[in-house]
Amino acid sequence: MTKLEAVIQPSKLEPVKSALIEVGVEGMTVLEVRGHGRQKGHTEFYRGREYTVDLLPKIKIETVVSDELVDKAVAAIIRTAQTGKIGDGKIFLTKIDEAIRIRNEERGAAAL
Amino acid sequence: MRRRGLSALLLLGICVCSCAVWAQTTSPDRIAKLEQQVTAAQGAADNAWMLVSSALVLLMTGPGLALFYGGLVRKKNVLSTMMQSFAMMAIITVVWGIVGYSLCFGRGNSFIGGFEHVFLRGVGTAPDADYAATIPQETFMVYQLMFAIITPALITGAFAERMKFSAMAVFLVAWSIIVYAPMAHMVWGKGGLLNAVGGRIPTLDFAGGTVVHVTSGVSALVCAWVLGKRLGYPREAMPPHSVVLSFIGACLLWVGWFGFNAGSALAASGLATSAFVATHFGAAAAALSWSAAEWLHNGKPSVLGGISGAVAGLVAITPAAGFVTPMSSLVIGFIAGAFCFFMVAKVKAKFKYDDSLDAFGVHGAGGTIGALLTGLFATSAVNPIFHDPVSGATLASGVFEGHFRQLLNQFLGVAIAWVLAIVGTLVILKIVDVTIGLRVPAEHEIQGLDLTQHGEEGYMWEASTV
């Protein structure tokens, strides 16, 4: 089992979500976060004072999938979230030790 | 022959009887009654307008100012900021009823009123002809109360996000008695030193440019200086947490200001109309000039800038509203918007004081420039306020009409407001600091005043846990 953490542009949430469901991903958690990579922030003005905003709004999608699905899920994200410009985001993969379904205490791949 | 004579007699009789009846329908009694009814009708119109104006001015404080200021502070302080305005609505009302109204509008001397109206004694439905001859004195009292409420509330912008609630309450009550009452009396009270009618230094202040805005704005500057900067200022960014709230507040201020300025005509009259229009034009012009200045300076016109400009224009037109033409209002507004932008964007940074919500930059500076411009633009064509004491002929009002001395009078009135505000505020702040303490402890300031002063959070938008 592998955990995918994808930080993407907020405007890409709907296409990415749809694509993941299409390839068979059945569960995910979506977080509203702030962050930046190489993308510079922007300046805002309030009453004559300049503020540099370098933590930009992003969406983070977390989903745990069985190893056979990882490549398809990664491809789905890249296909829908990529624009070619700085700020597209990143995907991180980690190995998961265990997954448990709370409802009926199923474990392993069956719990995904 | 006899029949014709009889008809003539009958006709004469009818004529005589008709004359008698006609005389009765236009007797002096009926005319007097009609005159009474006309006066009552005018009084009813005036009273209706003044009650509405009173409500409009209160709306300016709650929720106008509460929203305007609330949106400008950080999220953790939104409630405490609004509470400061709300507290004034409650506390000043009591103080006003007990002693405030009497100190402002009682007879007293040229500097302060007397005690004849403590506990609102003698304030009822009968008009006080010295102030407003066609409305109940009680209406006049409650209208003025709304001014007494918003003036200290304006000062809260200077010490937002760091002042103790208890200290603020004590300070502002003392301030309204020691600074506001004398200023209001001098400018508007019967026999006041600065009263346009009869004062030794007749200052033209239609709705409170000096009484409300200069006093509160300058006091705000003193407060900002005495209390010191917020932790992290100016290094850390502290942008408004909700320009949306500030926008709504500013629009409520604009609309409410019609009660503030046009209501100061104290009647539903042509002068009220004139002040209404001047107010609106001043706001519009200032919004444009602040936005233009910002567009040139920063490259983009911000919403916060636009609404700040409008408020600056409303402040500046306040002393002028009932004395100037609509076109002059545009000029006054245009100047005020640019001037206040300069004060807020440049002067504040240069002198490094933390006037958190620009109470001085907008109200102190806007009120000062507005009062001086009033001296220039006031015209007797709009409001024949000055009369020759012997002949009764109307005299020129302002400098452009030929009354050059008026600019000096305005300057003196403004200077007195500055001195009274500075001295009064310093003294009261010192006493409150020594007894209660002015600032919250640093950990409380970091946590936020909503939680530490009021035990509340402004927004609990996380998912419900029930």
Image (cartoon, coloured by chain):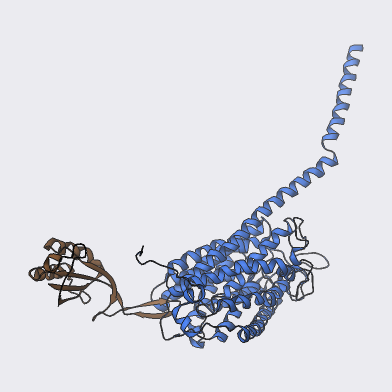
Q: Colour of chain A?
A: brown
Residue B397 appears in the rendering: yes
Question: Based on the displayed image, in which of its 4 quarters is residue B381 positioned?
Answer: bottom right
Chain letter, colour blue in render: B
Residue B251 point in image, percent of width and height: 50, 63
Seen in the picture, residue B171 relative to B321 is either above or below; the reply is below
Residue B316 point in image, percent of width and height: 58, 71
Question: Based on the displayed image, in which of its 4 quarters is residue B260 positioned?
Answer: bottom right
**Quarter containing the N terminus of chain B:** top right
Residue shown at 52%/82% (left/top)? Answer: B440
Depth check, front residue: B212 or B18:
B212
**Quarter containing the C terminus of chain B:** bottom left
In the drawing, does residue B452 fall left or right of residue B210?
left
Seen in the picture, residue A2 relative to B426 is either above or below; the reply is above
Depth check, front residue: A39 or B116:
B116
Residue B444 point in image, percent of width and height: 48, 81
In the orientation shown, which residue stands out farthest toward the front? A105
Depth check, front residue: B228 or B7:
B228
Total labels: the figure holds 0
Question: Based on the displayed image, in which of its 4 quarters is residue A72 positioned?
Answer: bottom left
Residue B331 appears in the rendering: no
Residue B261 point in image, percent of width and height: 62, 64
